[in-house]
Image (spheres, rainbow, N blue to C red):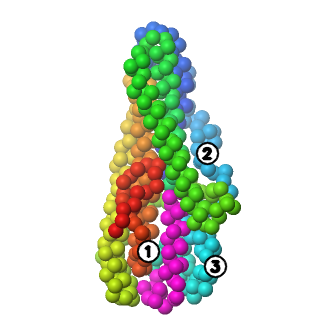
Amino acid sequence: MKSLFSHRTTSHLLVAGIFALPMAISAQTASSSQESDWRRANDAVGSFKRGHADVLKWEQANPGASTAAPGSTMGVAIPTAEAAVRMAWTVHRELVRPLSKLGPQNEQLIAEGRWTELDPSLQRRVEDADEVLEVAAAGRKAWIEAVAAQQVLKHQRDMLDAAQAAFELGQRMVTVGNWSKLQLSPVQLTASNARMNLRRAQHAATLAQSNLVKTMGQTGLQAGFSLPDQLPAIPAQPMTEADLEKRGDAIRNHLPDAESLRNRANSRGAMNAYMAAHALAQDSQGDVLKTREFITEETVLHYNGMLKSVWDLLDEVRNQSQATVDGIGAQRDFWIAEADLQWVLQGGSPDSFVSLGGAGGDAPAAAGH
């Protein structure tokens, strides 16, 4: 499945709205006449020959103005989950021997997250292979959480930009007598909520980076890592239940009876979380985000045509960014669920499984099993 976060549509739409707001604000409060809000705002935007089309063209010609990733100035880069796994291994010198016994082919499969292709008897044959897998799972999940938190932080900043612009516009309308303070109050609350959400996202990103630093054994040596702008796209189709059941049975044939029973229960929990996470990620990145993008595009067009007010545009900028944040959370939860499932199918026992709460900006909520 192609990631809907990989193209520039969302960024273009958000920037189209946000970069037009200063002009809209100036036009909105130029006088205290009762001329309709949208007409003044659109008169200002009309200074561009093709309205928002020229704003989009400007943004394309100046990508650094809107696409700089927060935290991208940090030191050592970890561009992929595979790189995170390999870095995590280097922290544990005791893993040199089991990694050597596993061989380069198995090592590559583990680093790439292709654990279902491993020989089910591997852990029984290679001492401390379970430790290799446990460290790999921790490194993979820490990287996923840090990348997702960084993504969410950027979009929370977009939402705050829109909310602050709306509040500034509302304040000016109160000043010139077009609005009462009561009318301004909901806009003020929206801006306050956006600031709180940004602080939560900043805290979540800091915690995720700290956990990644700790997992990589760099505490006190590295403040954080340079990470990619987005998570990998989720697969178009999940692994089938039949294949997963077959894999689970194969690994349990090599486990002691007590561990086999516990693994069977863990497999059910991990499989349910994986299937649900994939469905949620598909919905959030498919119908929900596509529909929201359509609404945003239409809102921009109607705004250009003086059929929508600046308030409609501001609302849609926030809605669009929130849909993106929710989609990032669902994408993150899928990759966490996938890592847990692959570990369980090697006999592992995660402390908890992702709860799929969908809280944008927070680390994935976990539920015991």
Q: Residues within 10 Å of mark 1 (few under 14, many from 20)?
A: many
Residue 213 circle label: none
Q: Is residue 59 above or below residue 286?
A: above
Q: Is residue 81 above or below residue 66?
A: below
Work out whether mark 3 precedes mark 2 in sequence or the reverse, and give the earlier one.
2
SS class, disc 3: helix
Residue 77 at what x, y percent from top left? 64, 60
Quarter placement of the C terminus = bottom left
Work out whether mark 3 precedes mark 1 in sequence or the reverse, and give the earlier one.
3
Quarter placement of the N terminus = bottom left
Q: Amino acid at mark 3?
A: Arg
Which residue position is annotated with label 1?
343
Q: Amino acid at mark 2?
A: Ala
Q: Magenta part mainly helix, strand or loop? A: helix
Q: Is residue 177 above or below residue 93?
A: above
Task: Examine the image and state in which quarter residue 208 appears.
Answer: bottom right
Work out whether mark 2 precedes mark 1 in sequence or the reverse, and give the earlier one.
2
The residue lying furthest to the bottom in this view is 125
Residues rendered magenta in the picture: 118-146
Which residue position is annotated with label 3?
93
Q: Residues within 10 Å of mark 2 (few under 14, many from 20)?
A: few
Tell me if residue 283 is in the magenta stretch. no
Residue 66 at what x, y percent from top left? 58, 40
- Please tell me which residue is depicted at 43% across the width and 61% down the height of the picture: 234
Residue 68 circle label: 2
